[in-house]
Amino acid sequence: MTSAWNPYCCGFAGECGLDPAETAKRLYHEDVENSVRADYALAKRLNINGVPFFILNKKVGFSGARPPEALLDIMKRVSENRE
């Protein structure tokens, strides 16, 4: 997969200290494309149309920005199998 965004993404990666060529290689790898397509299909099936959206342990889903403390609390409850 190639993209018109490639020069921008790889340029930003370079500015952050990453190797732009390695970034392009990893970003446009077939496995990454397949993973993104699968995530998109799942989001479509679940009627997810906003970001951020979190799915934890395939049990709990919620949208919206949350303070770190709230995210940690939700993660703890899910890990304890409480909802």
Image: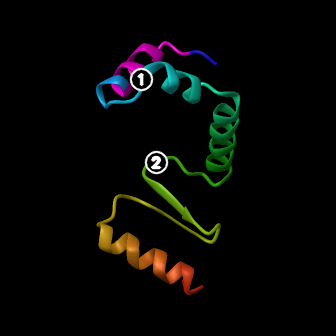
Residue 9: say if magenta. yes
Looking at the picture, which amino acid does disc 2 mark? Gly
Residue 48 in picture, x, y percent from top left:
55, 51
Residue 50 in picture, x, y percent from top left:
46, 48
Give the distance between the C-alpha atoms of the residues marked 1 and 2, in whole angstroms: 22 Å
Q: Circle 2 — which element?
A: loop
**Residue on which the image places disc 1:** 9
**Residue on which the image places disc 2:** 50
Q: Nearer the viewer, mark 1 or mark 2?
A: 1
Find the magenta span and give its range: 3-13
Residue 61 against residue 48 in the figure, above or below: below
Q: Nearer the viewer, residue 17 or 3?
A: 17
Image quadrant in which you'd find residue 14: top left
Residue 27 against residue 55 in the figure, above or below: above
Residue for point 57% across, 23% down = 25
Number of numbered discs overlaid on the protein picture? 2
Residue for point 51% across, 24% down = 22
Residue 8: say if magenta. yes
